[in-house]
Image (cartoon, rainbow, N blue to C red):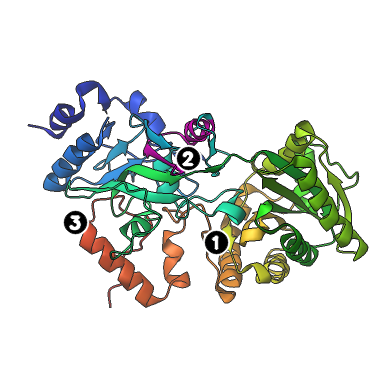
Amino acid sequence: MDLVARLADIVGERHVLVDAEAQAPFLTDWLGKYRGAAAAIVRPGSTEEVAGVMTLCTARRIPVVPQGGNTSMSGGATPDMSGRAIVLSLTRMNRIRAVDPIGNAMTVDAGAVLAKVQEAAKAAGRFFPLSLGAEGSCTIGGNLAANAGGGAVLRYGTMRELTLGLEVVLPDGRIWDGLTALRKDNTGYALRDLFIGSEGTLCVITGAVLKLFPQPLARATAFVALRDANAALSLLSSVRARCGDRLTAFEFMTGACLSLILKHSAEARLPLGAVPPAAVLIELSDTDDELALTERLEGALAEAVETEIVLDAAIAQDGVQAKAFWRIREGVSEALVREGKAAKHDVSVPVAAMADFVAAADAAVIAAAPGVRPIVFGHLGDGNLHYNLLPRMGQSDADFAALAPELTRIVHDETCKRRGSISAEHGIGQLRVSEMPRCKAPIELDLMRSLKTLFDPHGLLNPGKLLPAPVEN
């Protein structure tokens, strides 16, 4: 029996897509950088069906590309052009399986959309803190595969910290049911943590137990003007000292970044008049009284103004104003798209090294390409910057594209000098796979390849992603 017919036996005929038009949305990443081909798009409806598909594909040596909401920033869910692979779309597996308000846990299918998970937690009087720009379409399985971060990592952590248990299907079709809500389990290797962030190269994640938290009842939000990234670090230290773990978000933007947002967003309005050299968006949250929280933030900012760390600051007076402040930060990605082609980098360095990194990277890329425009923003509190470069004014896309690899090398060299990471939250995918040998020690790559061989000896899961092929001597 041919492959398509066997797949149809497992998941149902209408859930095996072979028509080119039906397949098209699954074969292009959402940024339009990568296109692929597939023997079929397969949409299982249960963990058992995923296991059946994996058993079949392993027996026939068919590559499998797991896919959730297809919102990868690094081409991690797009197949190659060979047409040999199947794309395993988990979007039918979208149940909220159980919510435990007492244990502060929720069990969900991997295909559950992040926004639906947030809503289910809220309906139970709880809070799931992961928040991303793509939360209306990205899925929990994809969030887990890339160890997603977002704006609240400073307080709550990445998906690895937000997950208690997993259910996965291994390449040979075996199911590991690790859907435990235990906070303590000291019985061996942390398989859960190994699978999270593995970008679909070791297993297919089919379910997860997520951590929930008390619903924040109060928020205080401020938009703060600063001289530079050094001042931002000083303010971060000051606010942390006064506010402790109430500090939920600390988002940094350079003046060039703010100017770009204002240029392309009719809705964005700076609350402080002229564009400052740099700015941060601060948010505190608590289960306590909102007035007390606002007073705490006011006190921290007043102290920073007195010591000349802060140039100016505005505290949101209500939820509408807070949303307007956040609209500025959320307008960065759209502004970059409207401005044209950009060389994008998702890096992390130790928090204390952030200002030094920005200064050094700016100097190095401008020396290599005079007129290039750094657009820098990100989650300063957890060390994650989105360091983007726009071409000089009037430069053609083709000329800038020719420079981009060298500029990326410079940015990543500055990152690695500070023992940073070339992928803080977007994943390696196929975008950065060739750069792994430059930023990972040979022993790290050897260990990772050994794990890949152990779990996926035939190299069928998400080939060409995350791990570069070994260099033959």
Amino acid at circle 2: Thr
Q: Where residue 78 appears, x then y in whole percent?
A: 38, 43
Amino acid at circle 3: His
Q: Are marks 3 and 1 in contact (CB under 8 Å)?
A: no
Q: Quadrant of residue 406?
A: bottom right
The 10 Å Cα crowd at callout 1, few under 14, some 14 to 19, many 20 or more, is: few
| SS of the residue under disc 1 | helix
| Dot placed on the residue nearer the N-terminal end, 1 or 2 | 2
| Dot placed on the residue nearer the N-terminal end, 3 or 2 | 2
Tell me, yes or no, if residue 354 can be seen here: yes
Q: CA distance from mark 1 to mark 2?
A: 24 Å
Foreground residue, 148 or 65?
148
Amino acid at circle 1: Pro
- Residue plotted at (35% across, 70% down): 445
| SS of the residue under disc 3 | loop
Q: Which residues are magenta?
A: 102-122
- Residue beneath disc 2: 71
Q: Where residue 374 appears, x then y in whole percent?
A: 71, 57
- Residue beneath disc 1: 405
Residue 458, disc: 3
Q: On the rendered structure, is 467 left or right of 354?
A: left
Q: Where residue 352 appears, x then y in whole percent?
A: 67, 71
Magenta highlight on residue 108 = yes
Which quarter of the figure is the N terminus placed in? top left
Q: CA distance from mark 3 to mark 2?
A: 27 Å
Residue farthest toward the top in the current orientation of the protein = 14
